Image (spheres, helix red, strand yellow):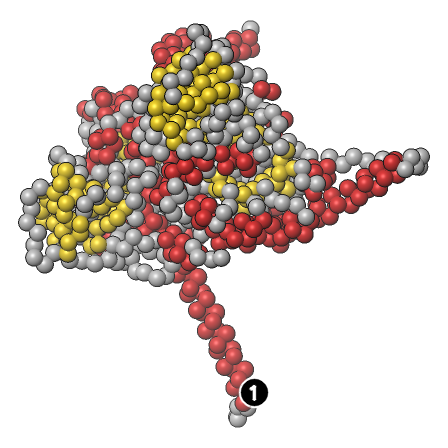
Amino acid sequence: MKKLTILCLIILILTAISNVSVSAQTARNEVLIRNATVMTAARGTLTETDILIQNGKIARIGKDLKAAANAQIIDATGKFVTPGIIDAHSHTMLDAINEISSSVTSMTNVRDVLNPTDVSIYRALAGGVTTANLLHGSANPIGGQNTVVRYKFGRPVEEFVFPGAPMGIKFALGENPKRIGANPQPGQTPRYPITRMGTMEVIRDAFLRARDYKQSWDEYRAKVAKKDKTAVPPRRNLELEPMVEILEGKRLVHAHGYRSDEHLNLLLIADEFGFKVATLQHALEAYKIAPEIAKRGTGASVFADSWSYKLEAYDSIPYNAAMLWKAGVLVSINSDSDERARRLNLDAAKTMKYGGVPEEEALKMITFNAAKQLGIEKQTGSIEEKKDADIVIWSAHPFSVYAHPEMTMIEGVTYFDRAKDIQKRGDLAREREMLEKMDINKAPGTGGTAPRIPSEKRIEERDEADRTDGGNRR
Amino acid sequence: MKITNYELRITQIWRFAAFLLAAHCFLFTASAQNGGTQQNLTGKAGTFAITNARIVTVSGATIENGTIVIQNGKIAAVGANVSVPANAERIDGKGLSVFPGMIDAATNLGLAEISGGVPASVDVAETGMMNANAKAFTAVNPHSSHVNVTRVNGITTVMSMPVGGSIAGQATVINLNGSTQAEMAVVPNFGLVINFPRISTFGGFGGGFGAPQIDFSEAVKRRDTQLDGLKKYFKDTENYARTHEAYAKDKTLPYPETDIKMEAMIPYMRGERPIIFTAERERDIRGVVKFVEEMKIKGIIVGGQEAWKVADGLKKNNIAVIYTNIYNLPVRDDDAYDFLFEAPSKMQQAGVKFAVSTGNDGAEVRDLPYHAGLAGAYGLSKEDALRSVTLYPAQILGIADRLGSLETGKMANVVVADGDMLDPRTNIKYLFINGRLLPLTSRHTELYDAFKDRK
């Protein structure tokens, strides 16, 4: 009975939270956004412009567009429209981030630990984020496989996964993998590597093994092709299969790192094995090796201006994004944080101040460029006809500090609507009051059943592999 | 003994190597401070006049086209029709706006260079529970690279505070310019920081991460025990002070020993100087209000997530709130998504005195304008958003007679920008602290200059 009550409670709360978006799921086939300032992130900014959305796609962009009689009409006079923000580095909705037991965990995939009810998803939507690259943590030189999702809060988890997004994997260099090795849990032995020397060798060793593994399959397939009946298939190796996919150019490498020398060393390993690193993640010193990065066509996904929170972030400068952009590197700005994800628009704005990035290029750093880095730019990342209608309507210019999103849509369906959110708050407050009066929720010593121990959610900041924060933060 | 040429050369090589080593050590130490290229009492003193500028005085009406004169470290004149002294260096303010320097009223700036993984650079939390004598003023590093990085974004004054234990120590209010702590000082020892005991089911004092969870009623008990301990410490301080006063009057009494920690407590225990309580939740803030009433002390809240719910108690006891939660996520899943964004607006409506602060340990204090701006995006007026990082913190820190607005006679902490100071796209063009015109350089501009032309 008690369990049932708790279950009911949880369901009630979840329904309450998701109320706003669930009710928005029944969107009509046509949506017309009228008279907005449209920042396309591809073809400039269009004033007093309409956007017609049909079946989740942007059907037309222009003036005085007509819609079907039953279309949802949104008057966006005085408001700004941008593509949905794409967060190229996130751990939102992951129930686990690091498989720390091994230095190479390429067999794991964050797809297995997605939690579609994480309230951080809704809060990110309320900050204009529609798409995120969910990455394994940075505990291992070679981490797990990533998953690109759209934040369809309130929908089943399989609908979150971005269809057709290329496969990827997380690598990590520097302090985080070192620290995990050097600081084992009580009773455990240190894990190799504990230096930057070892980190590079772990990666090199994994690719050498992958090359041998590929060779064994190539030979087997050659024998099969020749109808050689003695051919015996090699045993499948789930650790090395993703590594072979990297060598074959089928899997994107997203490499966490801070110091420029170690990122450059990874680029040299990639040269050695003949693949391209898709993105350098964080890359706070990338400005020191901008030409080397640009030459290889590797992207960089950076923080706008975080620095000094650890030694390897001490040479981070807010001009980084602008300097990389000037050198011709494809740059995105990410959050790596449930909190920061809500204000990526302001992070993009900062690149205009630090280094003079033009407005549209700044906007691309949280939209189109991120889409390109993740290989989903044909579907999303800009406001262009035939693309998916992943759209944010802002109260003011999105780079103004006073702006907030009013609506966030994915494929034409509204997943965040500030007006409705505010409207529902009274209901939520009443529901909360009702729940608090229930026997199980009575305060201790007032005759109720002993309550569950309430848990306070911790604020997740960056993907520190452990909780090292100098021991001084609140 | 004759030294051969060979031996001499070896000696010289060793000497050279030792020199190199020493030089390297020196350079490394210096570069971990501020690039080693500048002392921090920098810039140029003199008489300056910024003319034809939009002057946002904050305390009064904005002057659309006016002049501000800076002389002897102070604002000598401000207004639409101000005569410019003959010896003044003129700055054409056409298209520019002039603001008072921003004030972040709750940071640990200068106490932690690299907060994660470099404990040698961190001085924010003393060991032990009762450290009233620990003074941020003695540990704040004038040469921290955070100083320059912060001020070039328009923040000219900060309160920096210790955080550890129950009584953490004394906070300092400093200007972000000076080669010594004394040169930076605005109020060397401003207030006493107390981490107000709170109900935490994570166990341990204040609920350290990793401690086993405890039952709620047990958490309440622990909080009460801690609170009793704190009250007893105040009582002990009172007795201590009276014993010493009695002895001062009558030397025949037994000689009382000096307790350096209680000695430091006295002005705070007596309500002569403010106590800064860290508290977030409604129940904890109510606890602070009760404590302030009972102990007859001056209180300030740092944190203040739910302070607006305790408006009456806070107002009655004249307790202001230094709000540090704009860049935080709501604690409960069913809190409104903008719960912490709109708290400043709710405090404003409820008439609670407040300031917006980053609550940051140094590196990100320069984001102060965006904290205030985001409060502006969620309900607070633009004018109040600006006040929340200028005049309001000055009032709470007791320095409004000297700082926080552009008024004649005030200390010349002045920012000249090409737009709204709270907007992330705005560029700071000129910066004055204590009347000195400062170069807009920092560790960041130096690294930028070093690498911007690398091909």
The residue under the point 48% across, 30% down is A382
Q: Amino acid at mark 1?
A: Tyr
Chain letter for mark 1, please. Answer: B
| Residue at 56 percent of width and 34 percent of height | A374
Q: Within the image, what quadrant is residue A184 found in? A: top right
In the picture of the structure, the residue carrying the numbered disc 1 is B6
How many other residues sit within 10 Å of disc 1, few (<14), some (14-19) or many (≥20)? Answer: few
* A273, above or below A87, in the image: below
Q: Residue at x 28, y 29 (%)?
A: B376
Place of residue B16 in the rendered image (x, y in percent of width and height, measured from the top left): 48, 76
Res. B202 visible in picture: no
Q: Residue B342: percent from the left, percent from the top?
A: 31, 24
In this rendering, position of residue A280 left or right of residue A247: left
Query: How many marks can you see?
Result: 1
Which residue is most to the right?
Answer: A229
Say which of B339 and A417 sits in front. A417
Residue at (38, 38) in percent of width and height: A359
Task: Residue B45: tell me if it is visible.
Answer: yes
Q: Position of residue B219 (x, y in %)?
A: 43, 25
Q: Image height check: is A278 above or below A90?
A: below
Q: Is residue B62 left or right of residue B213?
A: left
Nearest the viewer among B33 and A363 is A363
Tell me residue B225's x, y (percent): 37, 29
Q: Going by the image, does A345 lie left or right of A254?
A: left
Residue sitting nearer the eye, A392 or B232: A392
Whether B178 is drawn above or below B18: the answer is above
SS state under label 1: helix
